[in-house]
Amino acid sequence: MKKADDLVSVTDGVAAVPLGPSVRRARAWPLGAALALTGGATALLLLAGTQWLNHPAVQAWRTVSLAITVQALPFLLLGTALSGAINAFVPADLFTRVLPRRPALAVPVAGAAGAILPGCECASVPVASSLIRRGVTPAAAFAFLLSAPAINPVVLTATAVAFPGSPAMVVARLVASLGTAAVMGWLWLWLGKEEWLRPLLRHRHTGHRHGHSRWTEFRLGFQHDFLHAGGFLVLGAMAAATFNVTVPGSVLDTFSGTPWLAVLFLAGLAVLLAVCSEADAFVAASLTGFPPTARLAFLVVGPMVDLKLIALQAGTFGRAFAWRFSTATTVVAVATSVLIGGALL
Amino acid sequence: MRRPVQTLLLALTGTGLLHVALFTDLYLRYVKAGLRPPLIASGVVLLLLALAAATRGGVRPAPHIGPGTPSGHGHEQPCGDDSDHAHEHERLREADQPHGHDHTGTPRIAWLLFLPALSLLVHAPPALGAYTAARANTKPVAVHKGFAALPAASPVPLTLTGFTERVQQDRSRAVAGRAVRLTGFVTPAGEDGGWYLTRIIFSCCAADSQTVKVRMYGRQAPPADTWLAVTGTWHPRGTLGTRTAEAALDVRDARPVAQPVNAFTDDLPLTPS
C-alpha cells in the first residue's frame, strides 16, 4: 500500500484535467496521424533520396508550417495561461452569477463577451474549455469560442485597415460573426449532446481544490494545456501548410465568376488555409475578383473553422464533437454571411 | 510523456523562440516584425515554466491534508513515471475520487512540438522566395486619388507597389522618363527567359503572404532568389497612367544587394549595415 500511496501523492496539488480510461482512445488518432505522417515522410525520403528535402516546395512547406506555429504560439500561451488562471483563481460561482441564468439568454451574452479576448482563434479554444469546466453552460462557452476571434477590437481594426473606405465590411463581419455564434449556441441547446464531449469536460466545477496551492495548480494546468494544445497546433499547421503550398494562386480566379460558387469556394478556402484571424482581412482584401459576400464568408468562416482549429478542438473537446461542430458551424456561417452580406454589402 | 521530457520540451521551445526572436532576426522569415515582443515574452514564459518544472517537479506537499485526500507523502516521485505508472494513477484516482485531477498523462501528441522547437534551434527553414512568388498572383494595388510630386533625386527609390501605382494610376505621368530604383528578388517568368523583380509581403505571417511583381526587360535573368537593386525607366507598354500600362522596367543597371532587414514588408529596403 506504501507504493500506491506514493503514486497517489504524485498527483496531489494538480488541477483541472481528470483523465478517464476513454482518454486512451481519444489519444490514439492524433498519434496515428503523426505516425502516418512520419512514416509517409520516411518512405518518401527512402524512395527519392535526400535531394527531395531541398526541393523548394518542401522548403516552402516547412517555412509556412513553422510560420503558422510560431505566429500562433504567443496566442496559444495567452489562452492556456488564461485557462489555467480561470481554473485556479476564479471562484467557481463567478460565471454562473455573471451570466443570465437561462441558457438561451446566456448564449448571446457570452457571444458578445467574446469582444474582450484580444487575440486570434488559438487562444479561445483553451479558454472556452476552462469555462465549461467551471460550470458555464457549454452552449454559452461555444458562443464565446466562436465569436471571440472574430469580433475583438484588434481583428475589427485590422479589417477596417484592410478595407479602407468600406466600413460596411467591418459592420457585416461583426454582425454575421455574432449571429453565427449565437445561432450555434442555441443549436447546441436544441440538439447538442454532452456525450460528444470528452469525459473530462462533463465533470463540472473542477477548479481549485481545498488544501492545494493555487499557484501550483495554475502552473501544472497551464503546462498541461499548453503541451496538449501545442501538439494539435503543430498537426493543424502542417495540414494547413500543405494546402497553402499546393493550391496555386491561379486556381482562385476560376471560381470567382459564379456568385454562389464563389461563396462556397472562399468558405472552403478559409477552412483549408487557416490564416490567423488578425490577418485574414488582408487576404480577403486581396481577393479582388470575388464578390463582397464571398469575401465576407471568408472572414466569418475563417476564425470559426479551419484545419488547425479542428485539430485543436478535437484535442480539447473530443473528436466526436469536433467534426459535428465544425460542419454545423460552416453551414451556419455561410448561411449567415449570405444573409448579412446580401443586406449590408 | 515523462516529466523530464516535458521539461525538456518546454525549455527547447522557449530557447528556440528566444533564438529566433531575441538573439537573431530569423523570426522575420516567418512572421511580421510586430510579433517580436510577444515572441520574446513567450520564450521567457516557457523557460520559466521549464525552470519551475525542473526545480519544483510535478508535486508539492499540500499545505495541509484535506478530507478525502489520500494521506500525502509529500516527496517527489523520482523522474521515472512511465505510462504504466501514469495509468495506475488514473485508476487509483478514479477509484479514490471520481472527480480527481491528473496531469501526468500529457498526451503523446505533444511530441509533435519537438518539430518546430528543433526547427527553430538547429535547422530554420529558408525564407519564402521565387518558388512561392512564381506561383502567386500579383497582389492588387490600392486605388489612389492623387499622388504627391516625385522626389527630385535621380534615380528615385520606389517600392514595387509604389512603382506599380504610379504606372497604372498617376494621370500626371510623373514617372515618364524618370530613372527609378527598385529593390527585390529575382523570380523567373517561365519559358520565355524573362524575369520579374518581386517582393513577398506578410500581413501577419508567411501563411498569408502576398506577392508584388514588376516585369524586367533588357537584361538576362539573374539566378532566382538573387536580391537586386535595379535602376531603369518605365518600359513603354500600354498607356501610362491607366490600367493598361504594364508594371515593367527597362533595366539600365542591376546591382546585387544583401537581403534587406525588412525583406517581407512593402517598404523601401533597409539594408543591413
Image (cartoon, rainbow, N blue to C red):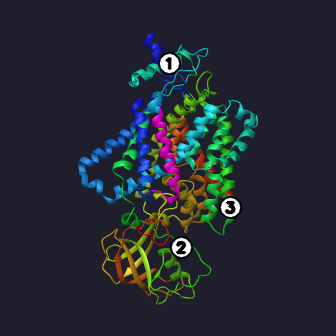
Q: Which mark is residue B74?
A: 1
* Disc nearest the viewer among 1 and 2: 1
Which of labels 1 and 3 is toward the front? 1
Question: Mark 1: which secondary structure?
Answer: loop
B260 with respect to A46 (left or right)? right
Q: CA distance from mark 3 to mark 2?
A: 26 Å
User: What segment is highlighted magenta in the picture?
Assistant: B30-52
Instruction: Using the rendered image of the protein, determine whether residue A238 is visible from the camera's viewpoint.
Output: no
Residue A267 lies within the magenta run:
no
From the top left corner, tell me how far across and down residue A211 is, in percent. Answer: 61, 21
Residue B162 image offset from top left, x and y in percent:
51, 77
Residue A342, numbered circle: 3
Disc marking residue B141 = 2
Q: Residues within 10 Å of mark 2 (few under 14, many from 20)?
A: some
Instruction: Quote the CA–CA distance across marks 1 and 2.
Output: 65 Å
Crowd class of label 1 (few under 14; some 14 to 19; many from 20; radius 10 Å):
some
Q: Within 10 Å of the Cα at label 3, are there few (<14), some (14-19), or many (20+) other Cα atoms?
A: few
Q: Quadrant of residue A165?
A: bottom right
Q: Amino acid at mark 3?
A: Gly
Residue A58 place in picture, x, y as percent: 34, 55
